[in-house]
Amino acid sequence: MAGVDRDQTALRRLPVTYQDSSVHGDAAEAAVLRAAGMERADLVIAATADDNTNLMVGQVARATYGVAHVLVRVSDPAQEKIFRRIGLESICPTTNIGDLFFAAAVRENET
Amino acid sequence: MNILIVGGGNLAYFLCRTLQAKKHRVTLIDRDYGDCEWIEQRLSVTVLHGDGTSAAMLEEGGGYQADAVIAIMPGDQDNLATCQLARLQFNVQRTVAVVNDPDNEAVFRELGVRALAMTPLLIEAVEQRAAKA
């Protein structure tokens, strides 16, 4: 496993075994992804706080490096549509949490 | 042509000014409120303050009527997102993205987005100059 993060302190929170393989840098920079060993990756997860970065990293993983499994996080539910159109497998925590609250509220009403 | 520019700074100002002089209808979307005001006071282009990487903002900026979209933000990922949205969701035929990381020029091309990297152009210019000297 290799992590990429712009924040050095976030990388230091990783288990020691993964710290050496991790790269401190911006995932939107091609050299950073290369340094993290993307060409050998079987699974890439793009889960930064920035949807556009995730959109780009996910596509780079798939198109440039031919990574078999790519998973991206999207925070803005409105952006989910474009992720799907591009064909990226995405997870939207905002939608998931919203659904949970909605389901809970419906249950509350029924009782 | 209806041209939508996403991004700010001096480059946005001069692009707007030049395209306007060529009789194009220009709309600018920029995240920086101060830049928006500055350009609005000087040029008669439509200026919108907001995030030009969101579909809602592109629609407000006339995405469906745009003939071309130019993305000139400092983040390559943002320029990619805008150009892909413009093409896939708004069916804009001509999109151009500025890339800051020269390595991303090839990456963007592979993803079907026309990209322009400034760094190689500048380096080529100085190297040619150096070769002549």
Image: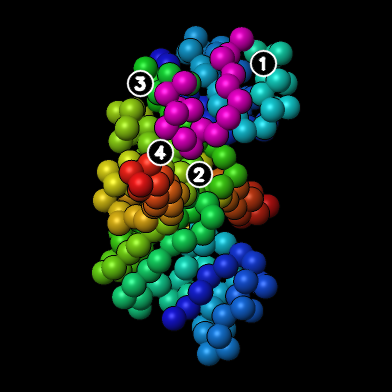
Contact, mark 1 vs mark 2 (Cβ under 8 Å)? no
**Circle 2 or circle 4, nearest the eye:** 4
Judge the density around disc 1: few (<14), some (14-19), many (≥20) Cα neighbours within 10 Å.
some
Chain for disc number 4 = A
Chain for disc number 2 = B
Judge the density around disc 3: few (<14), some (14-19), many (≥20) Cα neighbours within 10 Å.
some
**Which residue is labeled 3 in the image?**
B64
Q: Image quadrant of residue A40?
A: bottom left
Q: Amino acid type of disc 4?
A: Ala
Q: Tell me the distance, in whole angstroms, between the alpha carbons under discs 3 and 4.
A: 17 Å
Closest to the observer, A102 or B93? A102
Q: Tell me the distance, in whole angstroms, between the alpha carbons under discs 4 and 1.
A: 29 Å
Outermost front residue: A111
Establish if B28 lies above or below A62.
above
Contact, mark 2 vs mark 4 (Cβ under 8 Å)? no
Closest to the observer, B102 or A60? A60
Residue A78 numbered mark, or none? 4
Q: Amino acid type of disc 2?
A: Asp
Q: Tell me the distance, in whole angstroms, between the alpha carbons under discs 3 and 2.
A: 20 Å
**Which residue is labeled 1 in the image?**
B40
Query: Upstream in the sequence, badge 3 or badge 2?
Result: 3
B82 relative position to B72: left or right? left
Judge the density around disc 4: few (<14), some (14-19), many (≥20) Cα neighbours within 10 Å.
few
**Element type at mark 3:** helix
**Circle 4 or circle 1, nearest the eye:** 4
Q: Tell me the distance, in whole angstroms, between the alpha carbons under discs 3 and 1.
A: 23 Å
